[in-house]
Image (spheres, coloured by chain):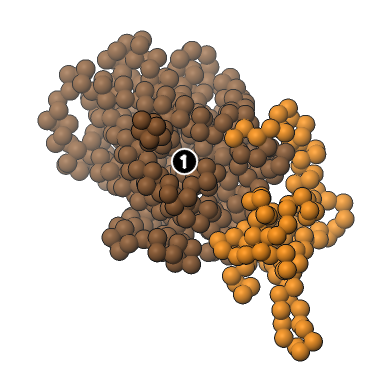
Chain colours: A brown, B orange
Amino acid sequence: MRKLLAATLGILSAVGGFVDIGDLVAASQAGARFGMAHSWVLLLGVVAICAYAEMAGRIAAVTGRAVFDLIRERLGARVALLNLVASYVVTVVTLAAELGGVALAVRLATGVPYLIWVPVAGAAVWLVLWRMRFPVMERLFGLAGLALVVFAVALFWLPTDWAALGRSAVSIEEAGQGWGTYWFVAVALFASTVSPYEVFFFSSGGVEEHWGAADLADARFSVLVGFPIGGFLALALIATATVVLRPAGLAVTGLEQVAHPVVLAFGGLGLAIAALAFFAVTFGAALETGLSAAYAAAQYFGWQWGKRVSPREAARFHTVLLISVLLGVLLLLTAIDPVALTEYMLIISAVALPLTYLPILVVANDRTYLGDRVNGPWLNTLAAALLLVILTASIVAVPLAIGTRMGQ
Amino acid sequence: MSRQLLDRQLVDVQGRLVGKVDDVEFAIDTEGRPYLLTLLTGPGALALRVGGRLGRMMALAAERFVTDRPMAPLRIPYPLVARIDSAVWLRVRAEELPTAPVEQWLRRRLIDRIPGAGRASG
């Protein structure tokens, strides 16, 4: 029973770590514009995040060192510093987008204007990071995030033409919008499933909870069950957008449109559940991105980090955490449109993907760190193929963004 | 030897994180053979190894927090190293070593002033 409980909690953490504002926006946009034609991208993204999170978790469990710690050892002080600067910028922009998502979710529930909620969301995120216990934090938001399952339920409630939905999932079409736009949306959706902060957070959490070789099986299980559940929730978002938004010709410009299918199916109750789910996943992701930004800096410089020591003993870590949340709030207070910010965030994440994933693959093959727990040949073949996909996404992201004017 | 040490995490006997091995110093014994003398940690040493404009910017940023410039790195005599695996483990406790100046400054001026700074949230 206790083992079952522990496994459930691990899965919740993984689900919470997967779905965020990027998935909400990218999945709904993909569904509203192209139907199910991007399902394969989501599947590929889930396979990639599972493979690389497993490696990052194994490295953390065997060596006791988190991802950015090893990035510096492998790349050297100078190149790793450039990597840190890029990763930090991407993570803080992601944090800003998540805070925007929190504020949008609260507006959806209360009707009070969005900008008022931005500083409140920032303060709340910082307070939770300052005081709440780490495992409680992850599980609470993971559990509440499961409320997204209401999208899958809505699909059964609405008069869904399942045969047509299934057909559009296997036929890849540009639906009269041009292939450039199709691939732009594909890159954004892929980046939303393999966000670098997910592996920073996952591996740092493993180090913080003192995973040993004995915890390896549990960590693997959480990854291999939790991330696919997150992927399923994202797929449900694509599907409801396909069924409801696409025939109506609705464009996704805010969380109202994302929630529209469940409102259509369940009315006010649906709206309440959707708002709760949006709040939980974006708030949880804001916590994770804030921590990840501070983890990366602390692990590069070798500072004391983590929530197991008092803040005064990790003053530099907590200062970076505080500054990151402040930067996120300030970025939103420029009155930038949070959905547009999310789209830009996904594109710069896509560009930065190899900075995180290449070092993980290198270390996962290094016997001086992992002994005989290095990657097997099958995992290496898969990981190398996925790395090619990641590199391709990184290279084409900016040309596609410019060529299609951010998918217009 | 130095390649194995550089950029590794320094950890005290209790598992506290002390810093990274930002640089190493060699000395030459009476028979003319080089040996490892000290490990250096701190933004001053790191900035020199990073070099270029990026290194200078890092040193300038760190020096804003100290009164005596240029910033001296923390020197850890090599005999204090207990063992080396994925990290460099020291024989001493972090409290026995001088606290990093930036850490000290931020602790005193910022973090300690926020209620709850003394308790770990776990």
Side (left or right) of A290 relative to A320: left
Residue positioned most to the left? A163
Residue A114, compared with residue B95, is above or below; it is above
Quadrant location of residue A244?
top left
Give the chain letter at badge 1.
A
Residue A266 location in percent, x, y?
A: 29, 13
Can residue A385 be seen here? no
Residue B32 location in percent, x, y?
A: 75, 88
Residue A104 location in percent, x, y?
A: 48, 23
Q: Which residue is mark 1?
A: A344
Can residue A387 be seen here? yes
Residue A346, compared with residue B34, is above or below; it is above
Residue A201 location in percent, x, y?
A: 50, 43
Residue positioned most to the right? B68
Side (left or right) of A385 relative to A58: left
Q: Nearer the viewer, residue A378 or A394?
A: A378
Q: Nearer the viewer, residue A150 or A263?
A: A150
Label 1 crowd bin: few (<14), some (14–19), many (20+), radius 10 Å: some
Residue positioned most to the front? A1
Which quadrant of the rendered structure holds the N terminus of chain A?
A: top left
Residue at position x 31%, y 21% in the image: A150
Label 1 element class: helix
Residue at position x 77%, y 61% in the image: B73
Q: Nearer the viewer, residue A78 or B102?
A: B102
Residue at position x 41%, y 34% in the image: A6
Count every numbered label the image shows and give the total: 1
Side (left or right) of A344 relative to A78: left
Quadrant location of residue A119?
top right
Which quadrant of the rendered structure holds the C terminus of chain A?
A: top left
Residue A54, compared with residue A97, is above or below; it is below
User: Which amino acid, by three-letter code, is at mark 1?
Assistant: Tyr
